[in-house]
Image (spheres, rainbow, N blue to C red):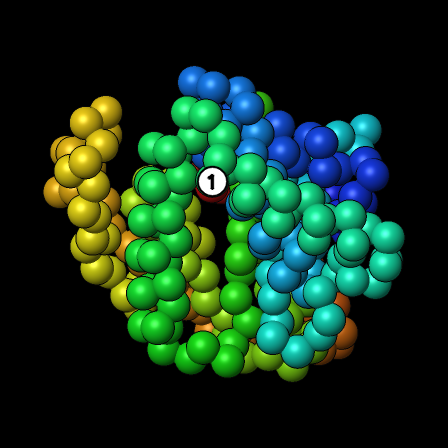
Amino acid sequence: MDNIHIRPFKWGKDYKKLFKVASEVWFFDSKKSVSFLSTTGFMLHYLNNATSLLVAADKDDNFLGLLGLTNKVDRPALRKNRFICCRTRVMEHAARMLLYVWPGARNSRLIEGLFVDNHTRLRKMVPDSSAPEVLVIIVNTAAKGLGVGKKLIEAVEEQLRSQGFKSYYLITDSSCDFGFYDHIGMKRAVDVSMSFNICHIPEFNHGNNGFLRGYVYTKELGQAPSPAAAKAAAPAAAATADSKSDDGSGQGSTGK
């Protein structure tokens, strides 16, 4: 985890790797063309609406994960560059339009639409919809267990505290590694069954109707310690770290 650093998202450097990771994690359709369109439309929707895009990278600056957040106040990050903004908007809408006419994309399109409907319903249940929202967090499968998700969450929490925000939330479902959010101390404010009506898709695993659930997680942000307090706490933290090192104890985490 010490070799992981957090930096801003760089379109030219990161977007191809991000799309590849998203395709492997979420959109592994048997048809690569369908998988590409689903990935492009989905990821660009969140990238285009995020006011902050943070990337976790290793010591060689290789992409390990991404977190996209909207604080509901600032302009989306990609709009700061007019060329990139126009390009990503065109790409997003083109991908969604093609998904509606592409041969073999019907099932993926319908299932994706049902997930969007469910998440729209969940958004209406958010306790404080004016709070910042984590739109997307994704970790490269090759970096699972390295603390990438935790590092991204810590970075965005520090950013939100510095901007004066008191809390934030995210919307997810049981098809992902939602236990990570419980592990890092987020509160499960909403837990409901996700509704599906897709009997007209024979290939769909209808067993999913019984266990898929939708969640809204929230977290209150404590005040960041003052520089003086942080300096005073450093020796105690170092002593604690030494004692843990001596007895071999430790704690790991995984991200979505």
Relative placement, left or right, of 34 versus 88 is: left
Residue 245 lies in what quarter of the image?
A: top right
Is residue 203 visible in the rendered structure shown here?
yes
Q: Quadrant of residue 193?
A: bottom left
Q: Work out whether 119 lies above or below 124.
A: above
Q: Residue at x 38, y 68 (%)?
A: 123
User: Where residue 76 sits in the image (x, y, percent)?
Assistant: 71, 65
Left/right placement of residue 175 relative to residue 66 reads left
Give the residue at mark 1. Answer: 100
User: Closest to the observer: 88 or 168?
Assistant: 88
Left or right: where 2 falls relative to 12: left
Locate residue 167, reporting x and y percent: 50, 75
Residue at 69 percent of width and 61 percent of height: 52
Report whether residue 187 is seen. Answer: no
Near-viewer residue (186 or 235): 186
Q: Amino acid type of disc 1?
A: Tyr
Decide: is 182 above or below 41: below
Residue at 49% across / 35% down in the picture? 101
Quick one: 165 or 243, which is closer to the camera? 165
Residue 130 point in image, percent of width and height: 50, 80
Which residue: 41% across, 59% down?
Answer: 171
Q: Nearer the viewer, residue 26 or 63?
A: 26
Can you tell which quarter of the image residue 72 is in? bottom right
**Secondary structure at numbered mark 1:** loop
Can you give x and y, in whole percent of width and height, for residue 83 in the image? 86, 53
Quadrant of the drawing holding the N terminus: top right
Q: Is residue 215 left or right of residue 131?
A: left
